[in-house]
Image (cartoon, helix red, strand yellow):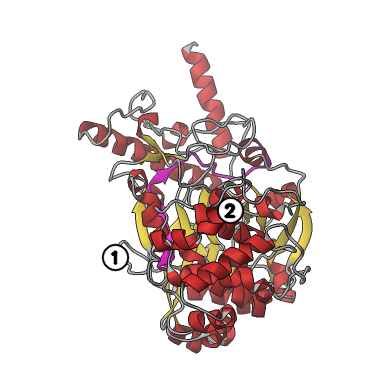
Amino acid sequence: MTENTVQSATARRRKWFQSLPEARRLEIRAKDRLRKKKERAMKRAYRNGLVQDASLPPQDGPSTDMEMNVDFQEESDTHQIDSTRPRQNRVSFSGIVQVDSDESDGERDGPSDAPDFECYIAPPDVQMDHQDSKDMTVGIIGRKVHEQSGTVRWQDGRITVLPTIMKNGVNICESGDVEVVKFFASLQESTQLSQHVLHLSAADMQRDDIVETIEFALRDNKPVVVRGNAINAPSEITTEWLDRKFGISPDMPVSIHDAEARVADSAHPHKAGTISMLVDGMSDPTKIQCVLDLPYAGVRNLDHGRRFGWSQTSQQCPIYEAVHPDNFISHFWALLHQAGYVSFAHHDADGVATYVRIESGGKMWIFFRLKSQKGGRTAYANAMMKLVDYPNNKEEVRKLWDAEVVYLGPGDFVIQPPGQVHGAYTPVEGFATGGSFYNLASMHHSERARYMDRKKAEFLTNQTHAYSYALETMRRIAIAIPHISKRIPLYRRSILSLCLMVIKCQDYVAADAVQRNIMPSETAVLAEAICKSIVSFLGIKNVGSISMTLFRDRQDIAGDPVDRDMLCTHLELFRVLDV
């Protein structure tokens, strides 16, 4: 290549760059500065021996022209960032969760049953670098969100836009969404010192006891936040990226949650649409929309419903009858949001524990916790109803609830116990993957959440299913108990909760479920027999008194460990194998 050719290409790039809007140029410069900062940090880490190999791209010397040193293409407005990650610093999360590796953006042959969850562990001065960019409004006002959008500063110093949809010169989000986001922004930042949130690093995920560590946290009603897992994330979401990397078709029909429709009718915020319609709307400042239930594939060893319930009971109870697909496809999902969408405080439906990983963009995630855990079910339900209607109950909400906020950037993920009350705000367009699961140590949380859904599901959760897969999965977990490894701990309150949900299943059908009647099942008789035997072993003679045992005292404690040897002996009848 001749010198004149190089100069000509450089001139074309400079001309193209100067033709961009000022906001876009600022955004590109910011990304260039961030990339250079990471490259310098990796060089320092290499010199200090913090990494084995700083596999950085070749450098042609220091740039004297900031604008011309930007990684961009003339033909495309979408740019890959974080592309300089050394492969030597990736570790596997195999056994905890199941997601796609970021080593290649090539097409997948199909979901694997248990691929490794690979991540890059950044050195100390590089970890969580995405949190250094505090102003999250740069490049989106007037482009992704309305030009009159206000801003708010969060307790960690981050600045975000406020939800804005202008109609006749008035922001229709002002009295609802804006107030909720300002409330969220006023809440304290969650740190490593938190007593109610467990903070881990990507390096922690390599510990031999990591499954037990997370399981115990969920048992004790503590969400888990994991940081330091850097991934390649696009600066803008495209249908091509979603299709190629996650298998989400552009023309997939979806139910879109629309902020404007929610203002008009909070109980019915849905509109029919497709993935391409939502993605195209990300550049429409007059819209704020999201999709909450995109199909995806995802969790593993923490999921006792699939690990024990469905995988290890076909010998005792073969699957002859038709099984509703929600037993499988509803376990894994993805979230796609336009900038400015706020999810009000809620818990997830069906009493599931949940896992969410940020693939692109970022979220402010808010964990709520009642200040007093001693109240009964009625007190808990009343407190929940006040929280979900915060604008009309501001003073009472602050008296009843504590809260902590975490920022989740690309690669960060959170695991929540069943019934965890949480809110979320997406200040920039974002895509996240997630999963839902049941765990034997957390069944007491599942029971309380499903009990609340029975009473007021339409107010307390943001996404329900026409069919609840919970019962069939819990029946199979119960059938697996006589054969489950003694290494798996069982707890009195938690196991009683499982038994109650199996025996008195009609009491746990969500209030807004389309199918209210319990359908016949091949698992019903055996599961109920095992649960009644467990209840008897725990010294409860009258099944009807289980509720009294569970509903008194604190609701968030799993109870004393159950003697597995004695329980195994008591359930010997159910351990006999058919020859």
| Element under disc 1 | loop
What is the x, y in percent for residue 54? Answer: 31, 29
Judged left or right of residue 427, residue 200 is left
Q: Residues within 10 Å of mark 1 (few under 14, many from 20)?
A: few
Camera-near label (2 vs 1) is 2
Judged left or right of residue 34, residue 337 is right
Q: Quick check: 71 above or below 402?
A: above
Q: Nearer the viewer, residue 567 or 370?
A: 567
On the image, which quarter does residue 60 sit in? Answer: top left
Magenta-tinted stretch = 219-240
Q: Which residue is mark 2?
A: 309
What is the x, y in percent for residue 268? Answer: 75, 71
Q: Which residue is mark 1?
A: 193
Judged left or right of residue 483, residue 292 is right
| Residue 43 is inside the magenta segment | no
Q: Residue 469: in sight, yes or no?
A: no
Q: Residues within 10 Å of mark 2 (few under 14, many from 20)?
A: many
